[in-house]
Amino acid sequence: MAVEARTKYETVIGIEVHAQLRTDSKMFCGCPTAPPDGGTDEPNTRVCPICLGLPGTLPVINRRAVELVMLTGLALNCHVETDAVRFERKNYFYPDLPKGYQISQYALPLTSNGRLVVNVPSEGAEVTIGITRAHLEEDTARMQHAGRGYSVVDFNRAGVPLMEIVTEPDLRSPAQARAYGETLRELLRAIGASNADMEAGSMRIEGNVSVRPAGSTTFGTKVEVKNLNSFRSLERAMAYEVERHVAALEVGEALTQETRGWDEEAGRTIVQRSKEEANDYRYFPEPDLPPLRPSDAWVAELRDRLPELPAQRRTRYTDELGLSPYDAGVLTADVALADYFDAVVAAGVTPKAAANWISGELSRLLNQHAAEGLRADAVALRPDGLAELIGEVEAGRVSSINAKAVLATAFESGESPRAIIEREGLGAVSDAGAIGAEIEAVLAEFPSQVAEYRDGKQQLFGFLVGQVMKRTAGRADAKLVNEELRRRLD
Ligand SMILES: [Zn+2]
């Protein structure tokens, strides 16, 4: 598409997130939200008359779920409603909804009118996204197509506490949509509200996208995109829709307000439902539940309990610890990584050295295990072990090249880096005599390079250092090699 066609239009995106709350029991009954201790989940085993929607049962509100939504609202700078928040019934028929309605919040959400500041690295900018609401509801059961024209349903998920977070249409690009999703995920994890795992389904995203002529204040035709299984899918799906809308507007083709699904493999969206088929949910107040009236004291207590949020952490890293905005961004994009960093610094390593090792080598090793979902908190090498290794490097007892190899081993085994250095004989050679002998050997082996260096070809110095390192299998104390070599050459 021509560049001028793109710049003629403005993209408008709003995001809806559903996040499963981290509670032990379901929203309105005592059934567990997960199988006991990593056990396998047999379908329809974590159910009772309440979450199966049997007649005559009465729901009871899960206090912890209410707290987690309020905590999220406070973290998102939302207003927390303390004046009679009613649960409402959202009515529709579907086999995954045993009661024929979902208990949700509609007219008055528990929290509303907040904002989230999002750092968008690819645009080199920070954007502030308005949060319309964060409310409480219950999850549906899980349907599975079993082939041959029939489906099966598992009610283990029915009634699991769910939070819906809706933004204002404030996002202006697919990259901003992705950055918002990632920032929100880290926030939900930092406050312990949700595992927010897209692949496991504990965080689900829908994007509402439209395009309008640049400068216009009215919205274009909106399309809702579902079936997004990763933040990458979200970004790709939004980009696909923007292209499709602009192409249609350019030739004067009408767009339809509809719901579309993202096909990851084909890299395109497909119509699921047009607006004419949209449901009328006939909301009305849930007669079996009392209105929620959180006390001011309860809200204040939760506000006190809020941990350091990723954005505050980023500021602390740059302003107090002197990290670059880039390093601070890498570390705070992942709560587990930032916690790891804090622990390494607490063990006595300077912030700059800790940041270099963690955003460099440690992140590289974590990326190699990204498919298994490995995060810093599950790495065998604990922060005090990395601190020990960095200490050895800074004391000149191991070269940084060999330290990387030690880290790779310790990363898998959790062994003490010092023990690995000793066992593998990777300790630095810092004996001036031994290093001097290796230098003499190199000078004898490369006389023409030595002559050229002395004639002013400065870059040959690095070559000669490299040769000395090679002869000592990377074990020579690099600082000492530099000093001794320079003393002999100059
Ligand atoms: Zn139940």
Image (cartoon, helix red, strand yellow):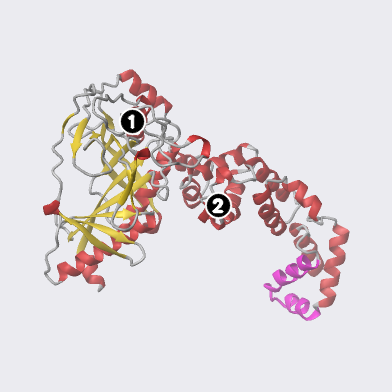
From the viewer's perspective, is residue 433 above or below residue 452?
A: above
Quadrant of image for the N terminus: bottom left
- Label 2, secondary structure: give it: helix
Residue beneath disc 1: 27
Task: Check disc 1: other Cα within 10 Å, few if <14, some if 14-19, many if 20+.
Answer: many
Relative image position of residue 372 (x, y in whole percent):
53, 53
User: Which numbered tag is attached to residue 359?
Assistant: 2
Relative image position of residue 145 (x, y in whole percent):
33, 53
User: Mark 1 belongs to which amino acid?
Assistant: Met
All told, the count of numbered labels is: 2
- Label 1, secondary structure: give it: loop
Residue in view at x 11 percent, y 65 percent: 254
User: Mark 2 belongs to which amino acid?
Assistant: Ser
Whether residue 163 is visible here, answered yes or no, is yes
User: Which numbered tag is attached to residue 103?
Assistant: none
> Which segment did they paint magenta?
447-471
Residue in view at x 55 percent, y 55 percent: 369
Horizontal side of 120 relative to 422 (left or right) equals left
Q: Main secondary structure of the magenta part?
A: helix
Is residue 469 on the magenta stretch?
Answer: yes
Quadrant of image for the C terminus: bottom right
